């Protein structure tokens, strides 16, 4: 199984859902236009589709682009809701947790805050 290693300098998670008909050229254009990072840098660019059951990772490797895809059959990738137009910078470890379906530190914190609110204020009235 291929997973990013520590030689990667940064991981950018694109903040909006992406049309997965886009391939290398379309995703590279999103990187240059929206993230404003050179696609040839030693970084990974991560894209999710709207239902968050697929992830594409684009990166440059010595002499060409690589595009990696993972499709979940019955689950969804857990990420923070789209609250920004800026790319989210992840660590390689956080990306590997996401790919392994483990929650990132933000996901854990969000759940803890939700539980604390529920204990303090009770359940929301319907």
Image (tube, rainbow, N blue to C red):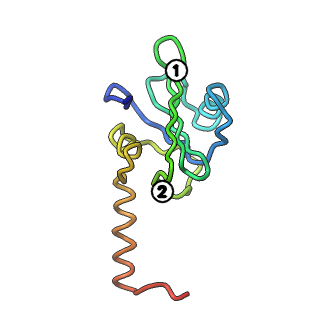
> Closer to us: mark 1 or mark 2?
2
Position of 93 relative to 118 (above/below) = above
**Residue positioned 55% across, 87% down in the render:** 126
Q: Helix, strand or loop at disc 2?
A: loop
Q: Position of residue 6 (x, y in %)?
A: 31, 29
The span from disc 1 to disc 2 (Cα, nearest Å) is 27 Å
Q: Position of residue 57 (x, y in %)?
A: 50, 33
**First-in-chain label (1 vs 2):** 1
Read off the residue under disc 2: 80
Read off the residue under disc 1: 40
Residue farthest top in this picture: 63
The quadrant holding residue 18 is top right
Q: Helix, strand or loop at disc 1?
A: loop
Residues at discs 1 and 2 in contact (Cβ within 8 Å): no
Position of 108 relative to 11 (above/below) = below
**Residue positioned 45% across, 54% down in the render:** 78
Residue farthest front in this picture: 73
Indicate which disc residue 66 carries. none
Q: Nearer the viewer, residue 116 or 48?
A: 48
Q: Where is residue 4 in the image (x, y as percent from the top left)?
A: 37, 30
**Residue positioned 62% across, 38% down in the render:** 34
Count of numbered badges drawn on the protein:
2
**Residue positioned 35% across, 62% down in the render:** 109
Q: Nearer the viewer, residue 15 or 35?
A: 15
Q: Position of residue 74 (x, y in %)?
A: 50, 53
Position of 119 relative to 24 (above/below) = below
Mark 2: few, some, or many residues within 10 Å (few <14, many ≥20)? few
């Amino acid at each position: 199984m291929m997973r990013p290693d520590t030689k990667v300098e940064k991981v950018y998670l694109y903040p909006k859902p992406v049309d997965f008909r886009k391939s290398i050229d379309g995703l590279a254009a999103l990187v240059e236009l929206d993230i404003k990072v050179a696609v040839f840098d030693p970084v990974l660019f991560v894209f999710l589709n709207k239902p968050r059951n697929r992830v594409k990772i684009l990166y440059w490797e010595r002499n060409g682009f690589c595009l990696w895809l993972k499709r979940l059959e019955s689950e969804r990738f857990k990420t923070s809701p789209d609250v920004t137009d800026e790319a989210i910078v992840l660590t390689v470890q956080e990306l590997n947790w996401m790919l392994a379906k483990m929650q990132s530190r933000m996901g854990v914190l969000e759940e803890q805050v939700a539980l604390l609110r529920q204990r303090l204020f009770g359940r929301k009235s319907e």
